[in-house]
Amino acid sequence: MDRFEFEREHYTGEYKRLAGVDEAGRGPLAGPVVAAAVVLPSNWYTNGVPESLAKLDDSKRLTEKVREELYKIIRSNADIDKGIAVIDNEVIDEVNILQATYRAMNEALGELSKPATYALVDGRPVPSLSLPHSAIVKGDSKSYSIGAASILAKVTRDRLMVEYDQKYPEYGFAAHKGYGTQAHLAAINKQGACPIHRMSFAPLSNMQGELFS
C-alpha cells in the first residue's frame, strides 16, 4: 500500500504543510480524549519514511512495545512537527464526546510549531476543524501522517491512564485504559464512580452514587 498517496495528492498549490490528525479515547467510560497532529517532512512523500519508522500503522494494530518505540522516535525527531491535546472527562461531560474530540483536534493543530495548511483526518469529516481537510476512513492504516498521529494520541492517553491507575488502583485502569470491560464494569458496580469517570456515558449516567474525592 502507498501510504503517502493522500499526502502527495493534496500537496499542491497553497497546501504545503499537511497535518495528519487522529484521536484516541472516544469510547472509554473514563479518562480524557487525546488528539494529535503530525506534519511529516514533505520529501518523505517521494523518498519514503526512514527505516526506523517503517512499522508506522494504525496504533491499534501494533503491540504496545512497537507503539512505544515509534512514539519515542516520532517525539525525538526534530524534522517532524507534532502537537498533542488532552481534553478531560469533565469537558467531555459538559460538551459531549464528539465536540470534545473536535476541540482536541483543533487544539492539537494549534500546538504545531508552524501552522498547517491542510489536514488529513482519520474517519469522518470534522465540521468545526480549523483547516480544510480530507476525512479518510481507516486513515491511520492508509496514511503515514495519520498513522503517526494515532501513535502519539494512543500512547499519550495510555500513559495517562497508567498514571490514573496509581491514583485509583481499584478500577484497573492500567489494564483496560477506561474501556467498558467486564472487570471495569464490576469495579464501578462495587466502588461507584471516581473523579475521572465520564458521568454522561451509560451506565454511569444512570448511577446516583457519589464521586470519590
Image (cartoon, helix red, strand yellow):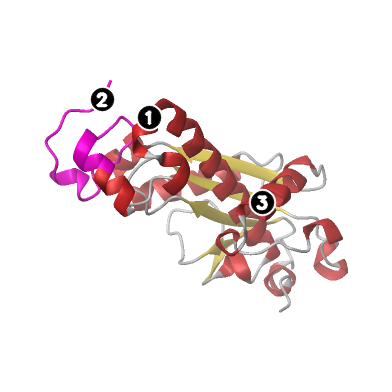
**8 or 208, which lies in front?**
208
User: Seen from this angle, which residue lies furthest top?
Assistant: 213
Q: Which residue is mark 3?
A: 65
Say left or right for 127 vs 188.
right
| Label disc, if present, on residue 212 of the rendered structure | 2
Q: Which residue is mark 1?
A: 168
Q: CA distance from mark 2 to mark 1?
A: 10 Å
With respect to residue 123, does 172 lie above or below? above
| Label disc, if present, on residue 144 of the rendered structure | none
Give coordinates of residue 59: x percent, y percent: 59, 59
For image coordinates 62% across by 39% down, the residue present is 111
Which span is picked out in magenta? 187-213
**88 or 10, which lies in front?**
88
Q: Secondary structure at mark 1?
A: loop
In reply to whether residue 198 is colored magenta, the answer given is: yes
- Name the image quarter holding the C terminus: top left
